[in-house]
Image (tube, helix red, strand yellow):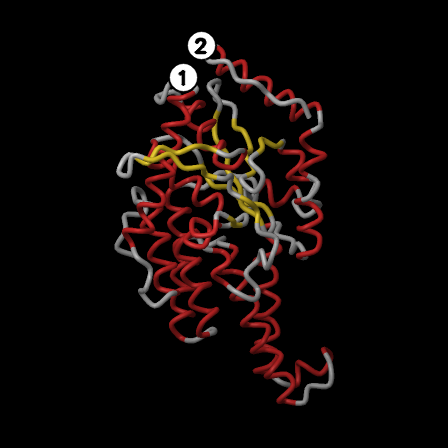
Amino acid sequence: MQLNPENFSLADAVFITENAFYNNTISYSQYSNAIHHRVNLVRQILKREKLDTSNQLALKYGIQQLNQRDNSYYYAERNTTMNVPPLKYDFDDFMGDKDWSKMFVSKLIATNSGQCHSMPLLYLMIAQQLKAKAWLSISPQHSFIQFPDNNGNLLFYETTNGNIVSAQWMIQSGYINATAIKNKTFLDTFSQKQLWVYCLSDLLMGYMDKFGYDDFAAQMRKKIEQLEPKNLTALIIDENEITKRTMRMIRAAGVKGVDDLPNHPNEYAAYKEMHAAYAKIDGTGYQDMPKEAYERWLKTIEDEKKKQETQEINRLIAEQLKKSKVTIQIKKQ
């Protein structure tokens, strides 16, 4: 809460949330150095390929190489060159159901593997230090990056496999409806303040993973909803807790069915509160995406890479870089 929501270090904000989960045992210097080395690696990639480090599209191209290929990194402090393998997607417990730390950037930089929560955050940390314009976006159970090309067109970048994708591919998940797009629930770019609230939501999720939903968690949830009334994390947690409380009350009162509820004023009031919470979420356009459906959709990226629209996007990016006197070869799909 002490960070300025309009101007803050994302790396520091994420460190705070993850270090709290680990009971203040993460080394800040090791964490920040790992990010700093990746920032330097991007600069080295651009220098080797004779790309202008002040060119916004070139900066994004350099960051993407961390996901797409092996890279050699010159470690100046040790006067050595080392191979850095590409970041990989970790399909094991990718939603953190068994181990919440699977969601962490600290896990990603330690193992070189992560998922759709940690990988976009690391991308943005590097972009922030390079002063490259990029934004976080979300879709059901997923987050990704949007950034502008040199003509101001927004591009969708999928960090889980290092590819530019089309908006159509995102929508093809089957869980993004017109209401969600109209209300900017999904596929919109996060403001700095929204990104700050996103980190606060991560802090809440980590707290609940360790301690459950208690008075402190409730205070955090209310603060998040106050800062961002349509925050999905806060709304879903609220809905879940109201539902559990209402069901306990109804069972304890021996309510025989919905028609019997008016005979139990307290339980009936709780029942109406529960449906009001449902209506809040429905109003955002949110639809829950089962884990199995998400995994199937994510694996369709290989088909997406072969589509004409996606190949055309990559061709246009290459053309823009060529205008900066840079030749980029696009691999044939």
142 or 115, which lies in front?
115
Label 1: how many residues lie within 10 Å, few (<14), some (14-19) or many (20+)? some
Label 2 close to label 1 by CB (< 8 Å):
yes
Identity of the residue drawn at 34% across and 31% down: 131
Identity of the residue drawn at 40% across and 17% down: 50
Give residue 143's position: percent from left, percent from top.
54, 45
Q: Which residue is mark 1?
A: 50
Question: Which mark, by number, is residue 325?
Answer: 2
Q: Identify the amino acid type marked 2.
A: Lys
- In 3D space, how far apart are the residues under numbered discs 2 and 1 (Cα atoms)? 9 Å
Q: Is 269 situated above or below 66?
A: below
Element assignment for label 1: loop
The earlier-in-sequence mark between 2 and 1 is 1
Residue 268 sits in quarter: bottom right
Identity of the residue drawn at 36% across and 28% down: 43
163 or 171, which lies in front?
163
